Image (cartoon, rainbow, N blue to C red):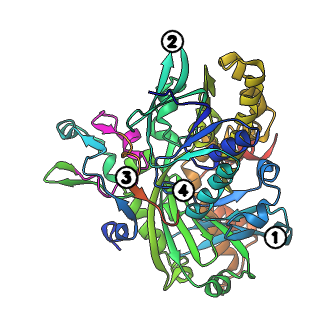
Amino acid sequence: MAVEEKLTTTRFNVDIKPHIRINTEMCESCQEQACLYICPAQNYILSDNKITFSWQGCLECGACRISCTKGAIDWSYPRGGFGVFLRYG
Amino acid sequence: MIREKFDVVIVGAGPAGSTAALALAKAGLKVAIFERGEQPGGKNMFGGVLYHADALIELIPDFWEQAPIERYVTRHDLIFLTDSASFSVSYKDDEFGHLPYNGVTLLRSKFDPWYASQAETAGAFLIPETLVDDFIWDGDRITGVSTQRTDGAVYADVVIAADGANSLLARKAGLRKEFTKSSFAVAAKELLSLPADVIEARFGLAGGEGVAQSFIGEATRGMEGGAFIYTNKSSLSLGVVVRLNSLQNRKISIAEVLDKFKNHPHVKPAIADATLKEYSGHLIPEEGFNMVPRLYDNGLLVVGDAAGFLVSTGLTLQGMNYAIASGFAAAQAVLVARQKGDYSSKGLACYQDLLKNSYVLKDLKAFKHAPGFLANPRIYELYPSLVCGVSGRIFQVTGHPKKKFLSLIRAEMKGKISLLRLIKDIIQAGRALIWP
């Protein structure tokens, strides 16, 4: 099952305002691109040699914040009450 | 504007924060506990097993009767996996099924709200849907927190940071350096629903009993980490945990690791026909004692995952019990500081002493070499296949004359690992886990 499909089982209260912002210009010179592998939601995707990102399915683990050595990720939690809401945990 | 002032502000209504809130509210203090989720537990997931913690019984004497637990864990399985073989070590103890339980499985969406409600009943103010984004400082002293609400400043004599593995607050207070990816693992987990009787039949459990299974080797494609299956009442918690730097080096996605594990021939039958109920991810601090930050400052204490209180031995992963014990110690420290009227670093320093004298820092210190040992790539790449290979040679009947076991072991080791290397690894394992 694709992660996208798995994420349909997870409840989100998506904020219109992104809680994570990416400076994708910095990504262009990045050799590591750890974000492609460490994100359980696979929110970082490489297409045409460019990293694209969506915050809607973010599981708020923080793995990308720690993994990005370029400092390209401006990371914060979603506003109170927004974001992922686990019904089982 | 009225200046909102509490005795204690706690950030995060997980097990560490709620323990501190419960203990302090019981002692008659005015306590506020902030939770960024819609309700406690909404952001939390774990494997997992809640292991015995004295503080729970001290705070809630009928804890085991009241708490929403799933199953009591009577069996622990450690399973080495290759592509097609597995080698299991299993320990089952019926005593683990008697009160007080050694460990129980639970769902955080049920447990965390229930536990926080205990603190509320004792008089703590739970403030959900509120993100604390910074401290309020008076010189070098923390005097409160700022939230994103209108008039969002809340003051307190002392703040307890129980804000989880990422602990942005401990970083903001300057108690720790920025993290590196070698210190953390990421987990991807599925909550799979199955009828209770099917779970009991497949895993060989009596009603109410549960099992905790850890998988090493092919479970993570040979990367540093492991996989797990825990039995809940009528669901399984199944997931994989891999170090961030391993994923990056091997260029394999954590989601891919999870899928491969689920499709392993020795795992697939256990989860056949199960329905995915929820997919989640989480960060796990894995460096134990070596990553514990400074634990207190003027007007501040750090507890639980925020303080990196987690012990991974490769056999068990314990965190929630340390979270609870550290929340309890923080509450005791606040009461001592309150008596002296001194919430400075000096007044709160007894927190560290309380932890040093409890199993929290004793365990972390005792197993401080475990993270180094567990960073040995051969544990994941080589030893599972070695153990399975030797077992295969022992059990296989070929019609040729059978050699004694030492020759079989030597034959299996040939070209894979030298005797010297093996002895060195055994010594490292001994230093990390076995001898004092």
Give yes or no for residue A63 being in the magenta stretch.
yes
Of the numbered discs 2 and 4, the one sitting upstream in the chain is 4
Whether residue A20 is visible here, answered yes or no, is yes
Residue type, numbered disc 1: Gly
Residue type, numbered disc 3: Phe
Range of magenta residues: A53-75
**Residue underneath mark 2:** B139
Task: Residue lying at the far left in this picture: please name it.
Answer: A48
The CA span between labels 2 and 4 is 34 Å
Q: Chain of mark 1?
A: B
In front of the other: label 1 or label 3? Answer: 3
For label 4, the SS is loop
The CA span between labels 2 and 1 is 53 Å
Which residue appears at 56% of the width and 52% of the height?
B378
**Residue underneath mark 4:** B41
Which residue appears at 34% of the width and 66% of the height?
A3
For label 2, the SS is loop
Quadrant the N terminus of chain B occupies = top left
**Residue underneath mark 3:** A82
Residue type, numbered disc 4: Gly
For label 1, the SS is helix
Q: Quadrant of residue B17?
A: top right
Callouts 2 and 4 on one subunit? yes
Residue type, numbered disc 2: Gly
The CA span between labels 1 and 3 is 39 Å
Callouts 1 and 4 on one subunit? yes
Callouts 2 and 1 on one subunit? yes
**How crowded is the residue under tag 3: few (<14 C-alpha within 10 Å), some, or many (20+)?**
many
Above/below status of B355 relative to B380? above
Task: Residue lying at the far front in this picture: please name it.
Answer: B1
Is A65 placed left or right of B275 in the picture?
left
